[in-house]
Image (cartoon, grey):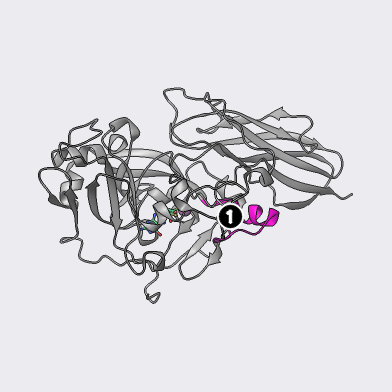
């Protein structure tokens, strides 16, 4: 592997691992805007960043269990209707560091900012598949294709030097309402190298691991992708499973992410003056579910107040309203009075009434994924 051609990165990023490059912004940067600037967007990689120079000849190969395999060039993708979808991408390992404090886990440590909200511009995968002869809303092709596998250009050690890959069901890929994109833009600019230039998949509402960057090929296959990141990683095991008794085949790959909520205006430990403080952060759920409520407590979870939620600045958010950005997070804020040293807690409820677990111990898992426990920060009041 060769890390001599990595792109430049913003110095604000906190680096969790250098090779491969894994970094997140300080949590306070996440709440300074609803759409996360590209520079501040977390970067999650499993190998060196590929360098695609010959964009004229760059093409993705679409093949597998359907009639007419085809090579698509960038101009073919750009000719399709362009959609701008605001979607939150979250790594399943977000908040892993906090989980590892309960009990050791294996994986790159992340604070609370392995998440970001971007406007992704590109073609709908449903249109791309239609272009090669697979109709909208297909769940199985005539030759038995049921899953869509995305293969990358990058190389990673977990795949023994092979490419990163993942798959989603064909029914989701061919459903225009699922908004799965082959994106060539992020926040109105061409994708940069870190985020998948020239073309990446964006699967809204699903853990980041399925949004394959630097797309090289698409395979229509009968069973879900057998790659490492689908079968030997990004699965959630019960707290009883350890590295000696783990059986990977007993669990399915993680897809939709669960309801999540984080305070970004405060660090884990803070020293404040007594008085009023604005608490703000983000909340998001998977599968296109909106955020019904965000509750904040300033006494460790005994009493709660409801926070104001918004996507557009100043406009109250109503879960699942047709004008919402369906796949995007909400930001929240609430003024609270802090008379003495306390623990501040935040938790969200999504539009299917899913709630978050109170303690990290009950959802501890050896890979440290999906830490969605109540977010707690400590405040010491000094005079
Ligand atoms: N795609 C490729 N080709 N290689 C990768 O290492 N990492 C995945 C996903 N797609 C990855 C990838 C993971 S685990 C996440 S969380 C997201 O990309 C991160 O996307 P970002 O770096 O644009 O934030
Ligand atoms: Mo991830």
**Is residue 166 visible to us here?**
yes
What residue does disc 1 label? 366
Dot 1 alpha-carbon crowd within 10 angstroms: few under 14, some 14 to 19, many 20 or more: many
The image shows residue 368 at horizontal and vertical percentages of 57, 53
The image shows residue 346 at horizontal and vertical percentages of 68, 37
Query: Magenta-highlighted stretch: main secondary structure?
Result: loop
Q: Quadrant of residue 136?
A: top left
Depicted 360 relative to depicted 108: above or below: above
Give me the residue at 71% from left, 52% from top: 268
Depicted 124 relative to depicted 227: above or below: above
Left/right placement of residue 6 relative to residue 378 reads left
Give me the residue at 72% from left, 28% from top: 305
- Residue at the front extreme? 245
- Asked whether 313 or 55 is in front, the reply is 55
The image shows residue 301 at horizontal and vertical percentages of 76, 35
Depicted 82 relative to depicted 100: above or below: above
Residue extent of the magenta highlight: 94-114
**Is residue 124 visible to us here?**
no
Left/right placement of residue 191 relative to residue 368 reads left
């Amino acid at each position: 592997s060769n890390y001599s051609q990595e792109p430049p990165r913003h110095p604000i990023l906190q680096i969790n691992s250098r090779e491969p490059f894994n970094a997140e912004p300080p949590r306070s940067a996440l709440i300074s805007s609803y759409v996360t600037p590209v520079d501040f967007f977390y970067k999650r990689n499993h190998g060196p960043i590929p360098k695609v120079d010959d964009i004229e000849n760059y093409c993705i190969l679409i093949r597998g269990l359907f009639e007419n395999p085809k090579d698509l060039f960038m101009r073919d993708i750009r000719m399709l209707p362009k959609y701008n979808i605001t979607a939150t991408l979250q790594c399943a390992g977000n908040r892993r560091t906090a989980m590892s404090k309960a009990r050791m886990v294996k994986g790159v440590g992340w604070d609370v900012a392995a998440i970001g909200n971007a406007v992704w511009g590109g073609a709908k995968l449903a249109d791309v598949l239609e272009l090669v002869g697979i109709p909208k809303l297909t769940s199985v092709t005539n030759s038995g294709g049921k899953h869509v596998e995305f293969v990358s250009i990058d190389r990673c050690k977990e795949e023994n030097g092979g490419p990163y890959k993942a798959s989603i069901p064909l029914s989701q890929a061919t459903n225009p309402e699922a908004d799965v994109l082959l994106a060539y833009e992020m926040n109105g600019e061409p994708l940069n190298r870190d985020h998948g230039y020239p073309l990446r998949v964006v699967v809204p509402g699903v853990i980041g691991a399925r949004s394959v960057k630097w797309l090289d090929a698409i395979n229509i296959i009968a069973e879900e992708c057998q790659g490492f990141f689908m079968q030997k990683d990004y699965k959630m095991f019960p707290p009883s499973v350890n590295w000696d008794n783990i059986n990977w085949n007993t669990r399915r790959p993680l897809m939709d992410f669960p309801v999540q909520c984080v305070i970004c205006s405060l660090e884990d430990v803070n020293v404040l003056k007594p008085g009023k403080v604005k608490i703000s952060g983000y909340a998001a759920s998977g599968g296109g579910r909106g955020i019904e409520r965000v509750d904040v407590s300033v006494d460790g979870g005994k009493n709660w107040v409801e926070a104001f939620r918004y996507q557009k600045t100043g406009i109250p958010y109503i879960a699942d309203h047709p004008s919402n950005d369906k796949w995007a997070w909400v930001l929240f804020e609430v003024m609270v009075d802090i008379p003495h040293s306390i623990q501040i807690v935040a938790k969200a409820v999504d539009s299917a009434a899913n709630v978050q677990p109170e303690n990290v111990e009950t959802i501890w898992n050896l890979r440290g994924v999906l830490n969605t426990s109540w977010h707690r920060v400590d405040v010491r009041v000094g005079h």
